[in-house]
Image (spheres, helix red, strand yellow):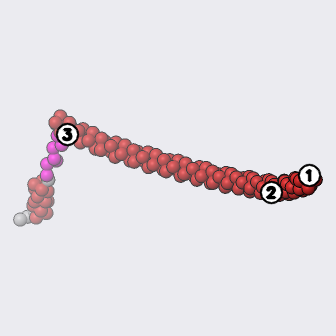
Amino acid sequence: MKHPLLVAALVAIAVSACSKQEEAAAPQAPSAQEQAKESAAQAVESAKDAAAAGTQAVKEEAAAAADATSQAADEAAAKASAAVDSAKENAAAAVEAVKEESAAAVESVKEGAAALEQEASEAADAAKAAAEAAVSAAKDSAAKE
């Protein structure tokens, strides 16, 4: 072994040559069926996303409509309450006016009754006086005869 350096170099070259791996073959292009599956999967995913977005939009619109309906109902209730209050006030005023008119009518009837009573008393007194005068005249006429 006169050339150990040469032998070592040849062994190193042989070992390195044997340890080299072949480059992997380029990956094959996907088949038409695989491409169709991938496209279908993407379309399904897109449809799911669109459906979720549509559902969310419908939910938001429904919530907005419910809020608007609730607000309109509250406003209608407030208007109805105001109308009821106004009707109560008007009714109270009408009742008060009827009370006043009734009281005035009662007072007028009382005054009329008092006046009639006075006139009846005076008429009774006049009738009594006339009756007494007639009796007196009848007595005088009977005495003369």
Which residue is rendered at x = 63% and y = 54% of the image?
A: 88
Q: Amino acid at mark 3?
A: Lys
Farthest-out residue, front? 145
Q: Is residue 47 above or below residue 3?
A: above
Quadrant showing the N terminus: bottom left
Few, some or many residues within 10 Å of mark 1 (<14, 14–19, 20+): few
Label 2: which secondary element: helix
Few, some or many residues within 10 Å of mark 3 (<14, 14–19, 20+): few
Farthest-out residue, top? 32
Q: Which residue is mark 1?
A: 145
Which residue is rendered at x = 36% and y = 45% of the image?
A: 55
User: Which of the two residues, 5 or 59, is positioned nearer the viewer here?
Assistant: 59
Structural distance between the alpha carbons of marks 1 and 2: 41 Å
CB within 8 Å, label 1 to label 3: no
Q: Which residue is mark 2?
A: 117
The mark closer to the camera, 3 or 2, is 2
**Left or right, 68 with reference to 4:** right
Using the rendered image of the protein, determine whether residue 132 is visible from the camera's viewpoint: yes
Percent across and percent down for residue 107 are: 77, 57
Q: Amino acid at mark 1?
A: Glu
CB within 8 Å, label 1 to label 2: no
CB within 8 Å, label 3 to label 2: no
Dominant secondary structure of the residues highlighted in magenta in the image: loop
Tell me which numbered mark, 1 or 2, is placed earlier along the sequence.
Answer: 2
User: Which of the two residues, 5 or 47, is positioned nearer the viewer here?
Assistant: 47
Percent across and percent down for residue 46 are: 31, 42
Tell me which numbered mark, 1 or 3, is placed earlier along the sequence.
Answer: 3
Q: Which region shows up in magenta? A: 21-28
Percent across and percent down for residue 123 are: 84, 53
Q: To which quarter of the image does residue 104 belong? A: bottom right
Q: Is residue 47 above or below residue 105?
A: above
Q: Which residue is mark 3?
A: 37
